[in-house]
Amino acid sequence: MLHIKPYQAREIKKKMSSWIREKIFLGKTFSEYLAEHKNPMFILAFIILCLSFYSMAYRLIYGLGPATNLSDTYPWGLWISFDILVGIALAAPGLTVATAVYLFGLKDYKKFAKPAVLSSLIGYVFAVFALMFDLGRYYRVFYVIGWSWGLSSVLFLIAWHFFLYIIICFVEWSPAFFKWLGLNRLRDYFSKLGVWATALGVIIAGGHQSALGALFLVASNKMHPLWYSSLLPIFFLGSAIFAGISMVILESTIAHKIFKNLVKDFDDVEFNKRTIGLGKALFVILCAYLILKLLDITHYNNWHYLITPYGYWYMFEILGFVFIPVILLAFAVKENNTKLVRVSALLVVLGVILNRVNVSLIAYNWYIPLSEKYYPTWMEVSLSAGIVTMIILSYRFIVRRMEIL
């Protein structure tokens, strides 16, 4: 049995305290660190988290019925629509940029890769965390891994892909994590696995992004014809790709503005040049998506639906958040205008959010009267807001401590 002498215990405690102060509190005492965060933004975040934790506890204690407005008619609500469908689409930076850098050799964009992978890792972890509250038997979520294999189920495919992709993102991010811990051997080991993890990640991420669209193929009689298509898996995959590129543009802009002091030898000219390059890629994918959408309407001969209220809403989605960004990007690339690229990226992100909500909620059961439609409770909204807040705080915590930017 190991015996630790009092002076050894004091030394261990002193080293642990020093490590926590340097690594966690950035060289400050706890009171100094806490005082640094007494500002309106963190007070707002604290309020949102308190409401969110209350909603989580209430749902776990009293069940889905009292906490949500879900029903047999609307078994999936805001938590699936926003936390999963939107969240996973916006967590695609790792799929896009990491693939371009590590598989296709676009080394000029290597500085975008680590933040992109971190975004994907945090996005997927919190998406799965949010999913726990939408599952009736949340405590059985791990059954899919070893106890209950539904090989013919699309949800089974998605569950396994989520599980594997989180591991892949951790492998890609882990060199920065182990370097922060001072474990250089582990850092070197996982650095060598990065390329292989990325290669597998392309297959896994591409598979479940399209599979999320495939979930709605069985609801052909419930979805509005303008949003229903046999190409839904391709539309979901394509929109996830341009959502990932758009998120990289927006996140890099915000992160490099807020954490500019953490970046060594920051070059504004080089950064803007790479942003224009991402804008070009975004333009090409948006054009392909827009052409497919036009062909899809033509194939199903759904043009007459465009002069209905749902058709006006559909045109608002396509024209406002696909066609207009295409025009803006064409002009931005020609004039080398990075601000327009960022505005276009913001529009695209908003468009992806709108598209996922349209497919899963607004266009779903479209024939039902407005009085019988699903509307989320304040608990559903507060829980989703809490998830977004936790994602932002986690990203900020990691970026300030590890070599990500």
Image (cartoon, rainbow, N blue to C red):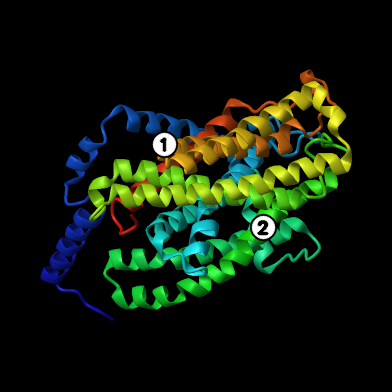
Q: Which one is in front, 315 or 161?
A: 315
Residue at screen point 57% across, 39% down? 348
14 relative to 96 in the view: left or right: left
2 or 1: tag closer to the N-terminus: 2
Marks 2/1: CA–CA distance? 33 Å
Q: Amino acid at mark 1?
A: Lys
Label 2, residues with CA under 10 Å away: few <14, some 14-19, many ≥20: many
> Badge 2 is on which residue?
208
Using residue 305 as the reference point, say whether residue 144 is left or right of it: left
* View extreme (front): residue: 334
| Mark count | 2
What amino acid type is highlighted by mark number 2? His
Rendered image quadrant of residue 16:
bottom left
- Which SS class for mark 1? helix
| Residue 124 image point, x, y percent | 54, 53
Q: Residue at x 82, y 34 (%)?
A: 224
Circle nearer the viewer, 2 or 1: 1
- Residue 256's disc number: none
List x then y, in percent, for residue 208: 67, 57
Q: Which quadrant of the rendered structure holds the N terminus? A: bottom left
When the figure is inspected, residue 78 is found, relative to residue 18, above or below; the finding is: above
* Of residues 82 and 285, the one drawn nearer to the viewer in this rendering: 285
Give x and y (percent) for residue 306.
Answer: 80, 27
Does residue 303 appear to the left or right of 256 in the view shown?
right
Q: What secondary structure is found at the residue carrying circle 2?
A: helix
In the picture of the structure, the residue carrying the numbered disc 1 is 339
What residue do we see at 46% from left, 71% from top? 194
Q: Is residue 56 above or below residue 404?
A: above
Q: Residue furthest bottom?
A: 1
Which is more toward the observer, 7 or 360? 360
Q: Quadrant of residue 2?
A: bottom left
